[in-house]
Image (cartoon, rainbow, N blue to C red):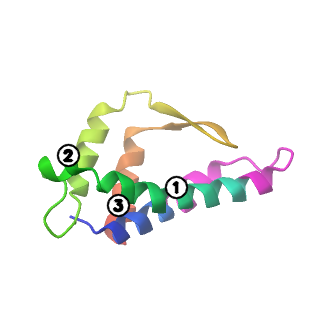
Amino acid sequence: MATISQIEQGAVKFIDAEVAPKIPTNIPNGQIKKIAAVAGAVYAVRNGLRKVIANPVLSTIGAINEDGDIDVDGIAEIAVSQIPENGFKVTVPILGELTFFREDVEKLKTYIKEG
């Protein structure tokens, strides 16, 4: 189980360590795009996570306990099972398409637990 704060911190560390280095800066305005993308991602994590966790379905299925802690292992297990072998693509404003793989979920989970 992890607190919202631990998940936020872990997600930000994941973005900084795993996503940001893959953002190309050798394109026009590349460094500015990288800064904007990372700042936007951090903002989305902080605001979006609280909205997702407010969904009553998560507590109904046992993903959130009465203290508000989140079952990171259970959610990660389900997420990994839903990701195709060749990953899934997400379109990110400013950056374009990013592909996430099963091992990215495991890395994210590690960053959360280190938090």
Q: Earlier in the sequence, mark 2 or mark 3?
A: 2
Residue 108 relative to residue 25: left or right: left
SS of the residue under disc 1? helix
Where residue 82 sits, quadrant-wise, is top left
Q: Is residue 48 above or below residue 3?
A: above
Query: Can you tell which mark lies on residue 44?
Result: 1
Q: Is residue 18 magenta?
A: yes
Name the amino acid type tagged 3.
Thr
Q: Is residue 2 above or below residue 92?
A: below
Q: Earlier in the sequence, mark 1 or mark 2?
A: 1
Distance in Å between CA atoms under marks 2 and 3: 25 Å
Name the amino acid type tagged 2.
Val
Q: Residue at x 47, y 63 (%)?
A: 46
Q: Is residue 36 magenta?
A: no
Where residue 112 sits, quadrant-wise, is bottom left
Q: Which residue is mark 2?
A: 57
Name the amino acid type tagged 1.
Ala
Location of residue 93 in the rendering, given as x and y in whole percent from the top left corner: 65, 42
Q: Which residue is mark 3?
A: 110
SS of the residue under disc 3? helix
* Circle 1 or circle 2, nearest the eye: 2
* Classed neighbour count for the residue bearing mark 2: other residues with Cα under 10 Å, few (<14), some (14–19), many (≥20): few
Return the residue nearer the eye: 81 or 52. 52
Q: Earlier in the sequence, mark 3 or mark 1?
A: 1
- Magenta extent: 14-33
Location of residue 94 in the rendering, given as x and y in whole percent from the top left corner: 70, 43
Q: Quadrant of the C terminus?
A: bottom left
Q: Residue at x 39, y 54 (%)?
A: 107
* Circle 2 or circle 3, nearest the eye: 2
Magenta span: predominant SS is helix
